[in-house]
Image: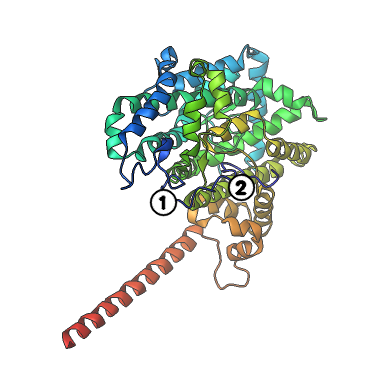
Amino acid sequence: MSNTPFGFSNSDDDPDRDKNAAGGNPFGGGDMPFGFGAGGPEGGFDPAQLGQMLTQFGQMLSGMGSSMGSGGSGPVNYDVAKKLARQQIGSVTPITEGNVKAITDAAHLAEMWLDAVTTLPAGATKTLAWTPNDWLDNTIDTWKRLCDPVAEKVSGMWTQGLPPEAAQMAGPMLGMLGQMGGLAFGSQLGQALGQLSKEVLSSTDIGLPLGPVGTAALLPAAVQAFSEGLEQPNQEILVFLAAREAAHQRLYSHVPWLRQRVLATVEEYARGITMDFSAMEDFAKDLDPSALADPSKLEALLQQGTFEPQTTPEQKAALERLETLLALVEGWVETVVTAGLGERLPGVAAMSETLRRRRATGGPAEQTFATLVGLELRPRKVREAAALWQRLTAEAGMETRDGIWSHPDLLPDSSDLDAPNSFVERVTGVGESGNFDDPMAQLEALLAKERAAEEAMDKTRDEDSGTNDSGSNDK
């Protein structure tokens, strides 16, 4: 697991996952989903098979009852998700006035120190102390945007593979099947969010912009638990975590395209999802109907991997872009926090390393979330990204470093993280006639080159077309 990606990643550890990909069915394998095969000597649809499948699902659907009664209209049943998350959270330690004052003071000090090491101004208009329930309430809207595209694609695939005759005959059942999917996703999402809410240290702890814009937040109970394993004073740890939260807020607030790009890349990932339905028939035959009335039993079934999506080349490309983008965010945050606090708090380097290891090991919540949508929250290339930003700061200055965030096309890509020398040389102008003092001018030059290349290609096509027309006329 040492090479698992940072941000969202689809696990490729299972060698059997793509074994059915060679079939003609877009879902993997040569047969239709839910056990529908060729159906007859002419390859047509056999209605008798639909009846058999309906029989298999009948008891399963009849057991859903009140579990599907509310919040089941979308691809994820968020009523179930929030209910299960709150059950997972249990009792919480209340926020005290001392918690609020300590976090406010730490944030104020952190912002003052960050002002000297970045050109991006403060991004948080308020700093709050959250309980796990507060974290759940304030991040659920972003989780909806992250989860809905994946769930919608997977839910739609349950019906896309059916022949027209099957889809028409199974119409009412398909609606119930969609509700079942919403319940399934909601159940597992609730378990994951409930556990995450007790583990996260701040609103941006996992690198994603989950909370409301302009709101910085730390979770005192999780911070206290995190501090118990460290040798640094509690106040220094709090200032360090407040500085990381403040740095994330500066980046996400003052780089207008960044939040949208992160979330849109997850949606792009969802569009590439395919599923292998070879396990669905066995799932329908062997499922205990009582499991659908008990979310914990349904959770255990889902962890068996029945609904895991497959990896596609499009997904791999989207995930690599997301991995690189989030690594750049994390590396930049580490760079500016180290620059602002390193000389003032001797334990910054040790605390940064602790956070890297903490995220690298993962936890039950991350594993559950990965089982649900094939995504993991793990670090990769953060060290490389931090090293690139640090070198760029030393050789070009923080103004040039922060200016690179002015447009996504100016950012380093994955290959630059592996070999940062060429990127830094491009930025500093070493070995080149140009320089990177004006990032927007550099961007305009890149766009001009692209336009010139497109015009040359258009001209070539026109010339080829003219030659062909002339040849036709000669004939």
Secondary element at tag 2: loop
Residue 34, percent from left and from top:
42, 35
Residue furthest out toward the front: 41
- Quick one: label 1 or label 2, which is nearer the N terminus? 2
Residue 221 lies left or right of residue 132; in this view the side is right
Q: How far across and down, in percent of the image, does residue 247 sit?
A: 61, 38
Tell me the residue that label 2 is attached to. Answer: 15
Disc 1: which residue: 24
Q: Nearer the viewer, residue 29 or 302?
A: 29
Residue extending farthest to the bottom is: 474
Crowd around label 1: few <14 · some 14–19 · many ≥20 (10 Å): few
- Pick the residue in front: 224 or 271: 271
Does 417 sit left or right of 212 as displayed?
Answer: right
Badge 2 crowding class, 10 Å Cα cut-off, few under 14, some 14 to 19, many 20 or more, is few
Can residue 193 be seen in the rendering of this structure? no
Label 1 element class = loop
Residue 239 image position (x, y, % from top left): 70, 30
Give the numbered dot on residue 285: none
Residue that appears at 59% across and 43% down: 11
State the colouring used for the structure image: rainbow
**Snapshot quadrant of residue 349:** top right
Front in this rendered view, residue 373 or 403: 373
Q: Are marks 1 and 2 in contact (CB under 8 Å)?
A: no
Going by the numbered disc 1, the residue's amino acid type is Gly
Residue 314: x and y in percent read 47, 51
Residue 187 sits above or below residue 257 on the image: above
- Give the residue at x 43% y 47%: 30
Q: CA distance from mark 1 to mark 2?
A: 20 Å
Report the quarter where the C terminus lies: bottom left
| Farthest-out residue, right | 231
Q: Residue at point 51% right, 52% down?
A: 317
Instruction: Tell me which amino acid carries mark 2.
Output: Pro
